[in-house]
């Protein structure tokens, strides 16, 4: 693993290794992929303003998210069907999160079941990402199983009444390989994704299954069936963040689904400050994912008010390259880069990272 120095190295190696349909599925964004590029370039438009002559002998990356201890503020976002990247799939990923003392979010449409994931990494803090199905009994059973298996929060994805248009998946007629299945389901729900109707198998799968009529009332319903705290994932507007809190959610995950839903939406780091501002009187935690690939990206998101960040594709690249060891390497890279950043920026612990540590590049363009 020594040859991988940065997340980009893992990405390049993974892209070389993966079969075309899987590679395209993992890396694609929606339509023209403008937001996909912006998710990372928007970070490059921010500048860190380091403080000098601060004692940084001791750095401390630890923090808490929804009361859960994390050894560093970088967790793993939910991504579907991880056994396409590596035979150990979700199990390797959650074990890497456990080894690093951080949070793993399991996708509803995973290729390992809730129970398998819980058993593989009993000590990891696990959150369960939920898609609400038309069949509320199916949905209820997922929630009950996650709660019983010790998952600590529900992450309700709210940006997906249907899946976005990902052109490569349509061209490739992407489906889950036949030796795999959606392990949280039985019967046709576990294999419907493999039906060959033409176009993207994923988009065919959700049509008729996901509840497109969902409104904020869904939170009330979820709260009536679970005592797990609810985090909403996919928020891009301050007013939606406030609605989520007023509906009873405990956390906001600012996300554009890795730019896979609607092209032309803002980069997540661009909308983070207005969302943090809108919810500050509620004291609700705000998280971010999308385009985070370096320790300085993490730092910038924290300075702009994120409690912690999550990474989607970086975990898939690590998994593809080396299973659990590859994901651990990815987390090692973030840890090292963040440690360096804390020291050189003169803010040795997470709580030292204040809003003034980062500004937009335009501040300097007036010269
Ligand atoms: C291949 C892939 C599959 C994904 N599957 C899911 C999913 O099942 N549920 C979900 O809420 N988000 C899903 N996402 C979105 C991620 O949770 C996350 O928001 C996104 O990957 C973050 O951006 P990043 O990849 O730039 O880190 C997926 C993303 C990718 C790349």
Image (cartoon, helix red, strand yellow):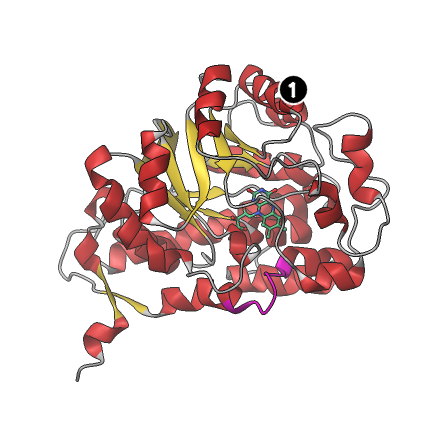
Q: Quadrant of the N terminus?
A: bottom right
Q: Is residue 210 left or right of residue 307?
A: right
What residue do we see at 78% from left, 46% from top?
176
| Residue 348 image offset from top left, x and y in percent | 23, 49
Question: Can you tell me whether the CB of the residue at mark 1 lies under 8 Å from the nearest atom of ligand 1?
Answer: no
Q: Which residues are magenta?
A: 27-34
- Magenta: predominant secondary structure element? loop
Vertical position of residue 13 compared to residue 200: above or below: below
Q: Residue at x 61, y 54 (%)?
A: 164
Q: Residue 129 location, x and y as percent?
A: 55, 34
- Quarter holding residue 239: top left
* Corner quadrant of residue 140: top right
**Residue drawn at 36 percent across, 26 percent down:** 248
In the image, 127 versus 166, the foreground residue is 166
Q: Is residue 242 left or right of residue 175?
A: left
Number of residues whose C-alpha sits closer than 10 Å to that of mark 1, classed few (under 14), some (14–19) or many (20 or more)? few
């Amino acid at each position: 693993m020594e040859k991988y120095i940065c997340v980009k190295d893992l990405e390049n190696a993974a892209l070389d290794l993966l079969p075309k349909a899987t590679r395209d599925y993992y890396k694609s964004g929606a339509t023209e992929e403008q937001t996909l590029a912006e998710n990372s370039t928007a970070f490059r438009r921010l500048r860190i303003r380091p403080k000098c002559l601060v004692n940084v002998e001791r750095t401390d990356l630890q923090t808490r998210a929804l009361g859960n201890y994390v050894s560093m503020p970088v967790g793993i976002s939910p991504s579907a069907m991880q056994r396409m990247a590596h035979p150990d799939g979700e199990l390797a990923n959650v074990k890497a999160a456990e080894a690093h003392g951080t949070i793993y979010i399991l996708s509803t449409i995973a290729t390992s079941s809730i129970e398998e994931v819980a058993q593989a990494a009993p000590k990891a803090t696990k959150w369960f990402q939920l898609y609400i199905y038309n069949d509320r009994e199916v949905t209820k059973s997922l929630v009950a199983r996650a709660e019983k298996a010790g998952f600590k929060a529900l992450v309700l994805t709210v940006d997906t009444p249907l899946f976005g248009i990902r052109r490569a998946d349509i061209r490739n007629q992407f489906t889950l390989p036949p030796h795999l299945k959606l392990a949280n389901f039985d019967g046709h729900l576990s294999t419907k994704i493999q039906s060959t109707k033409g176009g993207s198998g994923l988009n065919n799968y959700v049509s008729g299954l996901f509840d497109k009529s969902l409104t904020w009332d869904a939170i009330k319903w979820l709260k009536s069936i679970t005592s797990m705290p609810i985090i909403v994932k996919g928020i891009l507007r301050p007013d939606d963040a406030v609605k989520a809190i007023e509906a009873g959610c405990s956390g906001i995950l600012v996300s554009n689904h890795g730019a896979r839903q609607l092209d032309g939406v803002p980069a997540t780091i661009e909308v983070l400050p207005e969302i943090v501002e809108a919810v500050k009187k509620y004291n609700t935690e705000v998280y971010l994912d999308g385009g985070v690939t370096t320790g300085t990206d993490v730092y910038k998101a924290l300075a702009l008010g994120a409690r912690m960040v999550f990474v989607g594709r970086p975990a898939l690249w690590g998994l593809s390259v080396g299973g659990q060891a590859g994901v651990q390497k990815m987390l090692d890279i973030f840890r090292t880069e963040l440690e360096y950043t804390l020291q050189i920026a003169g803010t040795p612990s997470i709580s030292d990272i204040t809003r003034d540590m980062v500004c937009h590049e335009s501040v300097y363009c007036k010269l």
